[in-house]
Each structure stands twice: as C-alpha cells, then as structure tokens.
C-alpha cells in the first residue's frame, strides 16, 4: 500500500518481478482488483483510471458495485454473489447481455469482463480485466436490424457471388421459390430462371457488377411454375467479400391488375365509341374528348378534329349564353335537358337535346355532355 493511501501495482502479490508490475500498469485494457468479501476496490491500473475518470484516492472509497449504473442494481447479485460464494474457482469470462459500467461523468458503456481469483495481502480477491464492447454491441444491433429487414422484406432478396452462386436468401425467397434456405444456398441464380431467359444471365450479372442493373425477366419455382419479376441488382461488400445484392419483386399481381384495367378500359371505350348518343368531355369551355356520335352531329369526320375546340363555336350564336351556363354547371346540381341548335356547315342548324353533368377529372372540374337529336328535328 502506498504511503499516501492510494493504490499501486506493488500492492499486487506478483512477487518482486518488475515485469509483472509493468505489464499490469501498462496494459491497454482497464484492470481492477476487488476484495471478494467486501467488494472494495483495492487496485487499478492506469488504463482503468483513464477510462473511468476516477483518481486512485476516489477508488479507495468505492466498491465494485459502484462501477455499475444504479438502474442495473438488480443484476449485481448474479454478477458478484457466485464468486463470493465460491461457486467459481477459476477464471470467469462474463459478457452478460446489458451488463454496463459507469464512468465518473455518469456515462455508461457495455462491457465484457474476465475475472480471475487471486490472494491479495492475505485476503481473497478477484482481478477483473474490462473490455469496452459498446462498438461491438452497436454493430451487433445494426446487424440484427439489417437481418430483420432482410428476412421480413416482402420482396425476394438474394445475395450472390459474382459467378451467380446464392450465398443467402430471405424468407420471401423461400416462400416464392418453394426451397428451404439450405437448398437455396446450393443453387445458382440461373437455377431460378425461366430456361428461355438463360442466355441473358451472364450479361446481366456483368452489368450488375459494374453499374448496377434493373430489368424484367421470368423466374421459376421449384415446382416448375414460371412467374414474372422485376430485378434490381447491385454490388455490396460483406466481410471484405464483394457480393451482388438482388432484390426481386414478383409482378404477377401487378400485371394481372394492369391487364384487368386494360380490359375494363377497353370495354368502357367500346361503350363510349358505340354509344348512339354524342358524348363529350368539356373543361374550361373546350372539348377534351368527343365520341364518334358527337363528331357526326357536329359535322366532323373524325372525333380528333374536335379536340381542343371551343364548345360554344359548335352552337348557334343565339344559344351561346345557354352553352356557357351548361359548361359552368357545378357538382351536386341535378342534370337537366336543354334544346340547343348545333351549327351545320352544309344546311340548317340541327336542333339537339343536351344534358350536362359536372364531374371531377384529373384533379379539376369538368363537364360531361350527352347530345342527341331532338324529337322532330
């Protein structure tokens, strides 16, 4: 014991060999020694003082439990009582999840400790080597989050070597292809492709290695079923190894929805084109669309000729005020029928019945007109 009441390496029972004392004091890992019975700290090296921020005089008044944050008090019995009871006779490595130490400034950090029993001035003691594993824990947490994202992604995610061998696959891949993970990692990505697309694989892998690539193709399930996919593939580095990360999206449902919409649109277009009444879509007083029946009434050979035309120009001058009222109709107003005169380039004006209804169209207000010849016209 030093005469000033502090602690020094000379307190440790390592004989008279200066090399051992030097090794203790210069060890880059924080090391402290505590009395097994009282848990009082009886020695600490320079690395410990620097890491924790205490002076030797302050440590003299502390026990090992004070190195832990107060909120972790419930764990301390599991950490210290087995050693005090003699359960552990030799060196003991401890990396309990959530085990932390606290510095003098109140900051905490995750630790892993290696504790060894020794005799110190006739008392039973333990020497503890402390390793700060905060960075490792952060890395483990990051890896866990990445793994969760990987496994819970709805898209298929594959990790490939540069020659196309599968080294990892997520749960979506197992569901989509019908293989367990241990079988998927025995395959190459070409084994998952529609055989008719195999000539493209080598070129696509090469492009993914250089610039990344996005493409559409077809994949094959274990049962032989073929399904359309979009693939986004790029280079990543994992543990010093360059791999390809491929995100694969099954587009079966989207393609079916698009086809269903195409069929619906086609049917609606047929209804509009073959309707016996003239139909027109008007916005800001101009014609956006007119069906063939409307074009025929207006004397146009092609409905496209009416696109962009001012609606009022199609009607007799005496009816233009009424036309202006029609195209300014608001939503919620019941449609009403009006008899107006369409101008004719080859003969007398044509008396027509017109019904207007306000509709929303592409984020703004528009009007649908239904036009037919008036009775007895």
Image: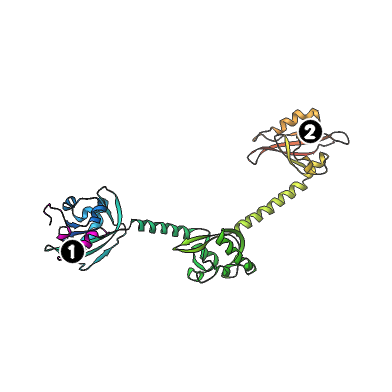
Dot 2 or dot 1: first in sequence order is 1
Q: Nearer the viewer, mark 2 or mark 1?
A: 1
Indicate whether 344 appears above or below 29: above
Q: Where is mark 1, residue-wise?
A: 18
Q: Secondary structure at mark 2?
A: helix
Which residue is the extreme one toward the front?
18
Where is residue 207 shown, x and y percent of the image?
Answer: 59, 61
Q: Where is mark 2, residue-wise?
A: 313
- For the residues marked 2 and 1, what is the alpha-carbon distance in whole angstroms? 109 Å
316 vs 165, left or right, is: right
Q: How many marks?
A: 2
The answer to whether residue 364 is visible is: yes
Could you tell me which residue is drawn at 49 percent across and 63 percent down? 242
In this view, the residue in front, 316 or 110, is 110
Which residue is the extreme one toward the right?
347
Disc 2: CA contacts within 10 A as few (<14), some (14-19) or many (>=20): few
Could you tell me which residue is drawn at 29 percent across and 49 percent down? 107
289 vs 208, left or right, is: right
Where is residue 247 shown, x and y percent of the image?
Answer: 54, 60
Could you tell me which residue is drawn at 68 percent across and 35 percent down? 334
Q: Quadrant of residue 26?
A: bottom left
Which stretch is magenta?
Answer: 3-29
- Whether residue 143 is in magenta: the answer is no
320 vs 203, left or right, is: right
Q: Quadrant of the N terminus?
A: bottom left
Q: Quadrant of residue 304?
A: top right
370 vs 193, left or right, is: right
Disc 1: CA contacts within 10 A as few (<14), some (14-19) or many (>=20): few
Q: How is the image coloured?
A: rainbow
């Amino acid at each position: 014991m030093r005469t000033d009441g502090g602690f020094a390496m000379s307190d440790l029972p390592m004989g008279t060999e200066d090399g051992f004392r030097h090794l203790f004091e210069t060890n880059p890992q924080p090391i402290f020694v505590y009395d097994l019975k009282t848990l009082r700290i009886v020695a600490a090296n320079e690395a410990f003082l620097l890491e924790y921020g205490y002076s030797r005089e302050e440590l003299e008044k502390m026990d090992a439990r004070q190195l832990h944050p107060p909120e972790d008090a419930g764990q301390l019995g599991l950490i210290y009582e087995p050693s005090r009871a003699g359960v552990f006779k030799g060196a003991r490595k401890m990396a309990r999840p959530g085990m932390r130490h606290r510095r003098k400034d109140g900051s905490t950090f995750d630790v892993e400790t290696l504790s060894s029993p020794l005799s110190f001035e006739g008392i039973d003691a333990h020497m503890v080597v402390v390793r700060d594993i905060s960075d490792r824990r952060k890395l483990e947490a990051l890896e866990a989050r990445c793994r969760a994202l990987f496994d819970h992604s709805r898209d298929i995610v594959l990790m490939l070597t540069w020659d196309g061998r599968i080294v990892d696959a997520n749960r979506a891949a197992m569901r989509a292809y019908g293989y367990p993970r241990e079988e998927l990692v025995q395959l190459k990505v070409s084994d998952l492709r529609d055989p008719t697309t195999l000539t493209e694989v080598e070129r696509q892998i090469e492009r993914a290695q250089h610039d990344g690539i996005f493409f559409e193709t077809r994949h094959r399930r274990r049962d032989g079923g073929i399904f359309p996919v979009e693939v986004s593939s790029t280079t990543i580095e994992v543990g010093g190894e360059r791999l390809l990360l491929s995100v694969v999206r099954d587009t079966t449902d989207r393609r079916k929805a698009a086809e269903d919409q195409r069929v619906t649109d086609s049917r609606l277009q047929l209804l509009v084109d073959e309707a016996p009444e003239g139909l027109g879509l008007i916005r800001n007083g101009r014609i956006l669309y007119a069906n063939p029946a409307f074009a025929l009434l207006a004397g146009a050979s092609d409905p496209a000729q009416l696109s962009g035309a001012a609606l009022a120009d199609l009607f007799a001058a005496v009816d233009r005020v009424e036309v202006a009222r029609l195209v300014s109709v608001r939503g919620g107003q019941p449609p009403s029928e009006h008899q107006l005169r369409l101008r004719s380039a080859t003969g007398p004006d044509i008396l027509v019945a017109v019904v207007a209804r306000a509709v929303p169209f592409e984020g703004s207000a528009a009007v649908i007109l239904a036009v037919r010849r008036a009775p007895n016209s």
